[in-house]
Image (spheres, rainbow, N blue to C red):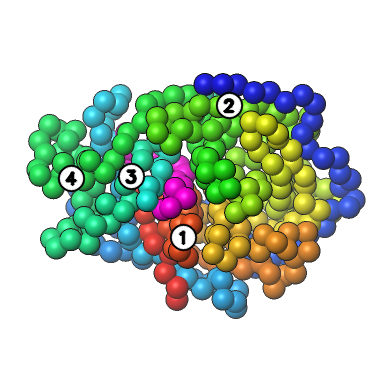
Amino acid sequence: MTSYATSGNVLSPYRSQDFSTVNSSGYTMGKITYTYDSDYSTTNSFQTAVHTLPLTKSTNDAYSKYHFKTAVYLPIDYPGFSRKSILGNPQSAAFSKDDHYLYVMYNDNQQASDENQTGWVIRYDWTKLNQLLNASGSSLSMIRRATNRYYRGTTTALDRQVLACMKVGPQFKAGHVQSLALNPKTNQLWFIKAYKNSTTATVQRLSMSTLKPNASVNFTLKSTVHMGSVLSFDNSGNAYFWTQTKSAWPTAPVNSVKFYKGTLGVNRVHFSLVKQGLSQAPGQVLQSMSYNSNNGRLYLVSDESIFSVPANKLGKLSTADVSRSNFSGKREFEGLVWQHTSNTGYLLTNKGPELMKVVAN
């Protein structure tokens, strides 16, 4: 792996008095007590039923009215790891540019600090898996059953077809890994390894073939600003992250949203604070950020609450531009991932791990 380091601060200077927020109130969710899916225990984790996470409240616009429906149950067990149920903690996901592959990033959550978490990536052949899922006699638990039987040393012919659609990458020091994102312009996958234990951030590029990092970039935004924990790119290659305000400014209350936009790569890292944020975040736990290339919107994900804004209006948003949606179900919203060639999105959840499709109301 090749390492790169920047010199000096990579965040453009700004004055807090120049910052403002647009009203996004009325839809901020409180902290969620996570629960398992309703039939997770009764089915011994081999779920087959379709579940929904219904919309409970939203703004009155075209981008906010949707809910989530089970697309597929993801695996839990896999041989070669330190314990059973090792795949129960997916953290983020990204589609390849042609949507053929889905990359899901995991960690084992066994280390004391986020940046030292052991992680790995599974590449799913999404095209072939969907062909199998749509075949007669298939089940939504198809992947989960196949990997469980593989773990136990007994597989069927169908199991082997399913397993052939998966490539499990090597383990490495990956961090919290809730930030895997594809830069569509460069066709590169990036994730944030370290961001909060030091003002020096580490962002790494993931090889799509070996499924391990092949480049690492260290940088400092500024001495008083940490890198965010999430990451997204638009079609032009602009990088974005968002943060929740912990220490209030006169112009930015606690739990308001700040947007950062810039360039991220081995040749250059630079970010600017967008001078306008949101008065309130979607929820208490910042989970994810994603870009929908079909509608040009950035999605801010917290548990049971998702906001979205048009990327091309950052800095000049009105309240009407901020779509806000609340859901029920008490599931942890790990990530929202959009395909690049269609307006199709999926929510990544756990307890147990599952992909749920975005369905218009």
Crowding at dot 2, Cα within 10 Å, few <14 / some 14-19 / many 20+, comes out as many
Between 197 and 128, the one nearer to me in the picture: 128
Boundaries of the magenta span: 86-99
Q: Of residues 45 and 336, which is closer to you in this image?
A: 336
Q: Residue at x 89, y 45 (%)?
A: 15
Q: Estimate the spatial distance between the alpha carbons at disc 2 and disc 3, rounded to whole Å.
A: 24 Å
* Rendered image: mark on residue 341: 1
Q: Residue 216 has which mark? A: 2
Q: Amino acid at mark 4?
A: Gln
Q: Position of residue 343 (x, y in %)?
A: 47, 65
Q: Position of residue 81 (x, y in %)?
A: 29, 26
Is 331 situated left or right of 264 in this image? left
Of label 4 and label 2, which has the lower sequence position? 4
Q: Are marks 4 and 1 in contact (CB under 8 Å)?
A: no
Q: Is residue 48 visible?
A: no
Q: Residue at x 68, y 23 (%)?
A: 5
Calculate the distance from the C-alpha at mark 4 to the C-alpha at mark 1: 26 Å
Among the two numbered marks 2 and 3 on one chain, the one whose residue lies closer to the N terminus: 3
Q: Is residue 310 left or right of residue 326?
A: right
Res. 21 in view? yes
Which amino acid type is shown beneath numbered disc 3?
Tyr
- Proximity of marks 3 and 4: CB atoms separated by less than 8 Å: no
What's the mark number on residue 161?
Answer: 4
